[in-house]
Image (tube, rainbow, N blue to C red):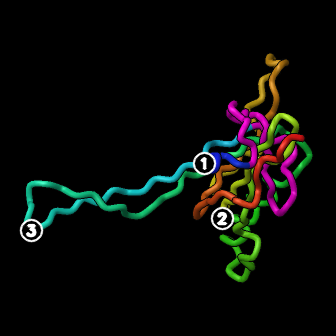
């Protein structure tokens, strides 16, 4: 008999919800995180023809690019977005500035309904390409929340296979 496709939790049939997630920057969870765009990569298709069969085009995988990630955080006193975005501006003005903290590896944790980490992704060498410190303000809108936004460029991601859903007893 073949091993089950998902041996850790074979009885699980429902997909995970998208509202239970956590982002770690510098190993610490980001407070008030509201939204994150999808992890997406695209591999370019390169066409080529052979001399023996010039009527048919073949496809080979070319370079892979990774879409930027946008994080939205409720407006709080947590300065993590602002501090990180400030590092990009600092290196543009000071050639002697250390690039040590300019790029960061971040971790995306997907949580189950009980709040346990069931899946993780590592995003490599991310840096802030766009930062929105304050939202539009409207005195007539009493039921809205202020949102800060950062857009991250990065050099790829991979699933952390050491994390898996805990088994239920």
Residue count near mark 3 (Cα–Cα under 10 Å), binned few <14, some 14–19, many ≥20? few
Q: Earlier in the sequence, mark 3 or mark 1?
A: 1
The residue pinned by badge 1 equals 1
Q: Position of residue 60 (x, y in %)?
A: 31, 61
The residue pinned by badge 3 equals 51
Front in this rendered view, residue 157 or 50: 50
Question: Is 156 left or right of 113, judged from the image as shown?
Answer: left
Residue 124 is tagged as 2
Q: Position of residue 84 (x, y in %)?
A: 77, 60
Residue count near mark 1 (Cα–Cα under 10 Å), binned few <14, some 14–19, many ≥20? few
Q: Earlier in the sequence, mark 3 or mark 2?
A: 3
Residue 26 is tagged as none
What span is colored magenta in the figure?
A: 8-34
Among the 4 quarters of the image, the one containing residue 45: bottom left
Secondary structure of residue under mark 1: loop
Front in this rendered view, residue 13 or 38: 13
Q: Earlier in the sequence, mark 1 or mark 2?
A: 1
Q: Residue at x 67, y 46 (%)?
A: 6
User: Which numbered disc, 1 or 2, marks the residue closer to the eye?
Assistant: 1
């Amino acid at each position: 008999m073949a091993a089950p496709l998902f041996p850790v939790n074979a009885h699980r049939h429902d997909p995970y919800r998208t509202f239970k997630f956590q982002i770690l920057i510098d190993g610490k969870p980001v407070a008030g995180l509201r939204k994150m765009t999808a992890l997406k990569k695209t591999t370019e298709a390169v066409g080529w023809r052979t001399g023996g069969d010039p009527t048919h085009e073949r496809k080979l995988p070319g370079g892979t690019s990774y879409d930027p990630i946008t994080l939205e955080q409720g407006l709080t006193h947590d300065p993590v977005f602002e501090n990180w975005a400030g590092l990009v501006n600092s290196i543009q003005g000071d050639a002697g500035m250390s690039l040590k903290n300019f790029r960061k590896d971040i971790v995306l944790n997907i949580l189950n309904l009980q709040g346990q980490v069931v899946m993780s992704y590592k995003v490599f060498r991310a840096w802030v390409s766009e930062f929105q410190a304050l939202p539009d303000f409207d005195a007539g809108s009493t039921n809205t929340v202020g949102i800060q936004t950062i857009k991250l460029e990065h050099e790829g991601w991979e699933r952390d296979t050491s994390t898996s859903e805990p088994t239920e007893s």
